[in-house]
Image (cartoon, rainbow, N blue to C red):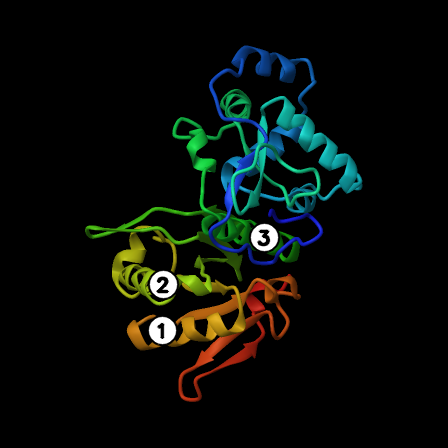
């Protein structure tokens, strides 16, 4: 069985397999792709889509529709995306219990970059594509779920307060002593004329207890020592930690773990569902209250336009 489009899960289940529309190979003509751009067969908007997937790895058609913010219908956009898949600029896949022969038309489809997209960006953008390989797209459904959530976080912040957002980077690489720290994302926002920094982590119920505990230990070494100053030299205070969970129960457990097992205190929690609310109104974000062992709904004024 595969996930169908009509199901459109908020949280993708674990242990599902990818079935790609196109097998990844090197038989994609670089010169032909470049000529297609030069002849306007491939457009500037197509370049924008390729750039988005290069930066954020995975996105659904609905998410790409949100990115473009155009009046075009979703059907027309979906047709264009599938045309780019045929050109091998993009690829797409579905998720199922077993790898299938082909992507089902009614499946829940996720888009990613293909080698033709890398060729385009190398010639028509400032993106550094030298370290991009098709294996970047080959992930477990657990990781894909988190990547799609990170994409959604970026789009929601971009929709809510675009003038405040300075940058948003997926899976930054921090080095603290001999440790490497890879949170889900980092971002910078301009608030009252000052750059404020935030580090984010996407978590799922199956991350408990070992995976999330190890992540918290590493984040603690970055956020509660002077190590953060190496990366945020112009900030007056350490970055705030955002944790996005798959449910309120998982968020509660995360709040308890962070408080009891680390010195991190400046953190806020949310969920996939709460992310769809108005970000600066009460309920989109939560605070953990250790005395009562409960979550409190708060207003995140940071995201006020």
User: Can residue 43 be seen at all in this image of the molecule?
Assistant: yes
State the separation of the CA atoms marked 3 and 2: 21 Å
Q: Nearer the viewer, residue 117 or 236?
A: 117
- Mark 1 vs 2: CB contact within 8 A: yes
**Can you identify the residue that label 1 sits on?**
257
Q: Is disc 3 in contact with disc 2, using a CB cutoff of under 8 Å?
A: no
Residue carrying label 2: 212
Describe the element under mark 3 as helix, strand or loop: helix
The quarter of the picture where residue 21 lies is top right
Crowding at dot 3, Cα within 10 Å, few <14 / some 14-19 / many 20+, comes out as many
- Callout 1: 10 Å neighbours few (<14), some, many (20+)? some
Quadrant in which residue 263 is drawn: bottom left
Q: Residue at x 29, y 73 (%)?
A: 261
Q: CA distance from mark 1 to mark 2?
A: 9 Å
Name of the residue lying farthest toward the left: 178
Question: Is residue 162 visible to the viewer in this orientation of the structure?
Answer: no
């Amino acid at each position: 069985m595969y996930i169908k489009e009509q199901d459109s899960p908020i949280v993708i289940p674990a242990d599902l397999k990818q079935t790609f529309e196109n097998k990844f190979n090197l038989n994609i003509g670089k010169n032909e792709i470049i000529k297609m751009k030069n002849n306007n067969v491939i457009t500037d908007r197509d370049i924008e889509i390729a750039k988005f997937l290069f930066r954020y790895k995975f996105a659904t058609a609905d998410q790409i529709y949100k990115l473009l913010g155009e009046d075009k219908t979703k059907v027309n956009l979906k047709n264009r995306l599938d045309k780019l898949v045929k050109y091998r600029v993009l690829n797409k896949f579905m998720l199922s219990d077993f790898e299938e022969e082909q992507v089902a038309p009614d499946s829940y489809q996720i888009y990613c970059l293909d080698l033709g997209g890398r060729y385009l960006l190398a010639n028509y953008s400032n993106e550094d594509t030298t370290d991009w390989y098709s294996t970047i797209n080959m992930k477990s459904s657990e990781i894909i779920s988190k990547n799609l959530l990170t994409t959604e976080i970026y789009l929601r912040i971009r929709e809510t307060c675009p003038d405040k957002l300075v940058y948003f980077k997926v899976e930054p690489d921090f080095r603290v002593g001999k440790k490497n720290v890879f949170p889900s994302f980092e971002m910078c926002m301009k608030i009252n004329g000052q750059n404020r920094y935030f580090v984010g982590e996407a978590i799922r119920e199956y991350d408990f207890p070992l995976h999330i505990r190890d992540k918290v230990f590493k984040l603690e070494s970055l956020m509660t020592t002077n190590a953060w100053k190496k990366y945020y030299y112009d900030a007056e205070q350490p970055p705030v930690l955002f944790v996005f969970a798959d449910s309120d129960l998982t968020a509660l457990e995360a709040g308890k773990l962070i408080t009891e097992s680390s010195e991190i205190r400046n953190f806020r929690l949310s969920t996939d569902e709460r992310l769809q609310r108005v970000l600066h109104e009460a309920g989109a974000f939560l605070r953990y209250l250790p005395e009562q062992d409960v979550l409190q709904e708060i207003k995140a004024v940071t995201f006020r336009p």
